[in-house]
Image (tube, helix red, strand yellow):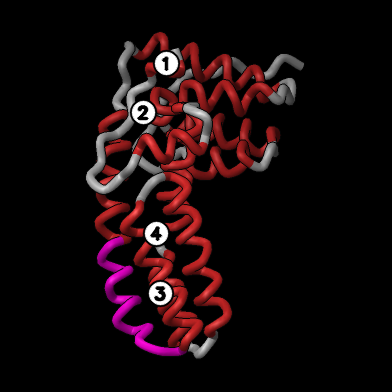
Amino acid sequence: AVDKMPLPQIDGLDQSAGLRRVAGNRQLYLHLLRQFVEEETGAAARAGVALDEGDFQTAERIAHTLKGAAGSIGFVDLQSAAMRLEMAIRARDEWRSQLADLEIELGQVVAALRAGLAELGRPEAGAKADDALLERLAALLAIGDGDALGYFLEHAPRIRACFPDGACVPFEQALNGFDFVSALGALRELARAYGKKLPEDSR
């Protein structure tokens, strides 16, 4: 039922363009939206720091990366704002005003994305089903099974909803890096911290 997976309704997000780029895979698209929030939230601030230090090369690279990320998921206005900043930095002209515009645009996008994703992240089922999801994920990680990432992506909104906002980030970073040992450790820590039961590893 991947193609029926709900997506956040966000002003300024061209979902059909974003979905076309991932061949209609809603699960992957949601993953990209979450990844965007994690990786690009501070992009304008990072570019500002680089510009203040006179490091035009780094600032241009940050704007370029943001332009690509925004474009690939369908934030057209943000993509344009990042492109204008990139060109202004390259020309060493008017970049302060372009940076100010970008900061506003990025702030609005991130706030809307966080709200839309949080809306989706509410658990649809009781705690029992969610505990079973966590147990299955832990079991896949314990045997170093490559399916662990796919399983997590498939059930990400419900797994994330088991924990407070942002608590899953260290776990997800380890999992995205295919570091299953660290990911399992992080998942166990989360389970302990928030009173979820995970079976102990069989030795």
Measured Cα–Cα span from mark 3 to mark 2: 36 Å
What residue does disc 4 label?
A: 79
Report the predominant secondary structure element of the magenta stretch. helix
What residue does disc 2 label?
A: 161
What residue does disc 1 label?
A: 130
Name the amino acid, label 1. Asp
Quadrant containing the N terminus is: top left
Front disc: 4 or 1: 4
Measured Cα–Cα span from mark 3 to mark 4: 10 Å
Q: Which residues are magenta?
A: 92-105
Name the amino acid, label 2. Ala
Which residue corresponds to the image point at 47% horizontal and 38% vertical from the top-left?
A: 168
Q: Nearer the viewer, residue 38 or 80?
A: 80
Q: Are marks 1 and 2 in contact (CB under 8 Å)?
A: yes
Q: Of helix, strand and loop, which one carries label 1?
A: helix
Name the amino acid, label 4. Gln
In the shown orientation, is residue 115 left or right of residue 192?
A: left
Q: Of helix, strand and loop, which one carries label 2?
A: helix
Q: Are marks 3 and 4 in contact (CB under 8 Å)?
A: no
Name the amino acid, label 3. Leu
Quadrant containing the C terminus is: top right
The reply to whether the magenta stretch includes residue 98 is yes
Crowding at dot 2, Cα within 10 Å, few <14 / some 14-19 / many 20+, comes out as some
State whether residue 104 is above or below residue 131: below
